[in-house]
Amino acid sequence: MEVDPSPSPPSSRPPPLPGYFDPESSGRREEYRRYRKRMSSSNVSPLLGSSLSKSSEARLLYDGGSIPRRPNAGLLLEDIKQEAQDYSNLEGLDGSRMFSSAKRRASLDGGSASDAAYSSGRQAARQTLKPVKMEDDMYVPHEGETSFTMFASLLDSAIQGLMPFPDVILQFERTCRNASDSIRSAATGKLRVVEDKLMQQKAQLLLDEAASWSLLWCLYGKGNEDLSEELFVPPTTSHQEACRFVAVDLTAQLCLRIVLWLEGLASEALDLEKKVRGSHVGSYLPSSGVWHRTQRYLKRNNNDSTIVKHVDFDAPTREGAQLLPDDKAWRAATLCPFGGIDMFPSLDALLRNGKSRTLQAIELESGIGRQWRLWKWASYCASEKIAEQDGGCYEMAVYALQCSNLKRVLPICMDWESACWAMARSWLDVQVDLVLSQYQTSRPDGRQLDDDMNGAQNSVGPESWPYHVLDQQPRNITALLQNLHSSDFVHENVSRACREQHRQIEMNLMSGDIAHLLDLLWSWLSPAEEDQNTARPLDDPEMIRFGAHVVLVLRYIFSDEIEDELEEKLVTVGDLIINLYVRYLFSEDQEELVGVYASQLQRDLCINLFVEMMELRLNSSLHTMYKLFLSAVEYLPFSSGDASKASFEEIIERVLSRSRQTKPSKYDEDFSDVAHQHHLQSLQKAMVIQWLCFTPPPSIPDFQMITGKLLIRALMHSNTLFREFSLISMRRVPELPAGPHKLLAILAEPLKQKENLISPEDQEVSDNLQEFEDWHEYYSLDATYRNWLKVEMQNAAVSPDMLSAEENDQAVAAAKETLELAFLLLKKDERPWLDAVESSPFEPSQPIFLELHACAMLCLPSGECMLPDATSCTALTSALYSTANEEDVLHRQLKVDVQVSSRDPCCIEVALRCLAAEGDGYGLHEASDGGLLAAIMAAGFKGELSRFQPGVSMAISRLDAWYSDGNGSVESTAAYIIRGLCRRCCLPETILRSMQACISLSAAGNSLDDCDKLIELVGSSESGMLHLFSQQQLQEFLIFERECLISKMELEEEQLSSDS
């Protein structure tokens, strides 16, 4: 059923709330959110509400079925069950259910963002979330459609320059929050306890990621704030000097941004609670009281002497009583000196104070910062006094925070965010106080200062402040983070949280150690040593996604100024992480998204990755293949002049080249399936041409040119495959060879548009078109012949008396069609079929060699595979040598090498090499028969090697020929050798098949004129057919001729008998 993912209605009782605000001021809520004013509405990208990328049609990527990996699933479930039991046993003092305190508060977006500015963004993101489905009581969240697809869309927009990268970071954060909200709202109250816990954990992880994105923006995406001189009213105040110092000091600025980030998280946490729990959350009226739960408790007229009777800050100390444990208002800092002037050293506070003269008047009388120091000293004394009297711990913390007295604050911080905020805020205040102390008229000398820091003084006055608490502060950001780990004052929950993944990420961002952050991410994401398969399904897709996007964002943010070491780390480790994410997207069938990320990889890695993906998707549906094709052609240049960047053209060339390579195969123990496996390989080779037959989207640059180039490349590669396929389809059997006919089927539709895409004026294009037409004729004839052979074999299996006239007519029609197509192919007026006449590009003065390399399988006359070994390879080498005369072997330096293939034990690798000669490598090759190398190889294909096992032939798998220099370096291809080899094999076989059809027709009483035409064609010197025949083929031709003559004589006798 469909479930509305909207937030659940507020519960009857409020959840436990942190008391952040002064009960006397309803505006404190907004004052607390005064920091992290992000951007004006003009800075929000207008493109957010619509798809910004080419991957706009992306579908759901992540089904949410996996959760972060845990060492032991049984322990995890046991912990969840125990916590669920604790829920049922715990009740708040007001009767409401409470969550376990061990659960970390949600850490949300860093800053008081303008809700109006981003409302359209939220709506756009939420609209992409589909309703959640309930199937078999198990919820499968669909946040992947928002997070993974939205991340790709936003990143693509930034790469194209449609959105600044700082804006993209903020949108990444918002996307994570929206996905988390979707999970929480859809799962609340609809699942069993264990399942609900897993979904809540998943939602929390997304909030943790949102917090990390928020910190990244605060530290690296947020611009510097310029303080205008118009804001300063002379004489300057301590607050103005503090703002000036923080704006220029890097350490103070870092502390300020961390504080604003953490306060923003608390603000977002309240927004979330208000949304989920109800409107009462965070809505304090002037009469409410800051100790919210204590106030409600008192309203019920309880007479517990241990509980305070009033809700002001002094009540616990004055009355010697306690608050309820849930009231934690220590972080609110609601004590406001100087008439409520905001003393926080930020631009927002400076703007909010305006040109108020209150602080200026105070400091003109007492001196800059003197009253402020007195206030801090009073707060320090109050915090210590409360601690000595064992008063309220939260009241003590409120005063301690005013004076950076960390040892009285940290014990109250129960989570990582609170402790980090307290440390950063205190350290920032101390830095400001040290600067302001320079304006004091008197200050202690060096010895007195040292004694004060070491605690040697018995009395400390306002003049020596704030050195009394200076030793509690960290000396640098590293020390601050170390204190979070192991300080004696921090709670164990804080130390434990430091080991969480996103807390470690955030601490590395604070310290600026980006190189260590990258190593840390890769250590979490890299496959285990025992599992090096990087294409395996992964258990933590959100972390992989986060890592990939962090790498890309950092690359663009640091693109202008970056150290060489960090740049290298971003490339090497970053590419590993991005590569892993691309593989994850690919494993989830999100081919439309991979191009955004794969295009950011280094050239070789990008090419290898796309080649691997294309090979894996070769047997998928056309729709799936087209998604991957679009992902490559849209995000990569078609051809690149930059050697460091991959191009679509290079990927396609690599795919085509690898498709012709011999693939390692697993055969049955008796090798009975070798022929079938090679049949499947030929089919795979043909299917690769599909990548060239897709139509690119018209939106890409040079659409028409790219489409034409792809079609030309398809023609060239298909002709190469047709040559190879023709040499393995010589057996006279009814079964059609799958490879060539699959190739023709794929090319049929694209070639209908060839007139609009390619120009036949180009000689290379014209030659390839002509050769394709020749092969089309040949395989049409081949299919017709096999159809006739099938009919003949079916009729032969039945007694002649039982055959119907219709069956006889069918056989005659098939034979006539075969002969008709054969004569069209054999007697071409304009140019002979598969014309191999070619002019060499080299002069006789250049020492040029011809090389022909083939990978083939040895086939017995029965069609079964003959396993090669060293002995058979040696025998085959000798047999190939024997096909050439001694003069050619010596003068043309013929070399023959045959070895068992290293990739396939059922195949052999044959390499032929000889010097070029006039008419064969030099000048014009007029014989159109491929020359010496083609003659040698033809004997092997026809199974007519005199010194080898009789009847054993070579079934080709791959065949290439080229010109080379004396060192063996390839100079250019020698296609005339392969075309001439095909003429040597295909034309004699076509004539023999035609003679076979003629004899069948003569048996049916038809004329033998076609037989005479074939005999005349072979004997004609103009046709040049005779020298293409081998000795055995000539013997077979003579046998067919004899049968024709006998049939002709019998026919004449029958006519004479009928006449008489």
Image: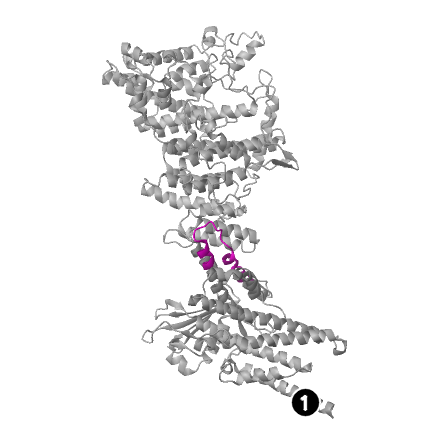
Write down the residue under mark 1: 1052
Numbered circles on residues, count? 1
Quarter of the image for residue 966 reads bottom left
Q: Position of residue 873 (x, y in %)?
A: 48, 72
Q: Residues within 10 Å of mark 1 (few under 14, many from 20)?
A: few
Quarter of the image for residue 1039 reads bottom right
From the viewer's side, name the closer residue of 78 and 729: 729
**Up-down relation of residue 49 to residue 730 (above or below):** above
266 drawn magenta: no
Q: Position of residue 514 (x, y in %)?
A: 38, 37
**Up-down relation of residue 915 to residue 367 (above or below):** below
From the viewer's side, name the closer residue of 911 and 723: 723
Quadrant holding the N terminus: top right
The residues colored magenta run: 683-709
Residue at figure coordinates x 70%, y 89% from the top left: 1055
Q: Position of residue 83 (x, y in %)?
A: 58, 27
From the viewer's side, name the closer residue of 891 and 45: 45
Q: Position of residue 48 (x, y in %)?
A: 47, 36
From the viewer's side, name the closer residue of 585 and 479: 585
691 drawn magenta: yes
Give the color scheme: rainbow, by chain, secondary structure or one colour.
one colour
Residue at figure coordinates x 40%, y 44% from the top left: 573
State left or right for residue 423 relative to residue 103.
Answer: left
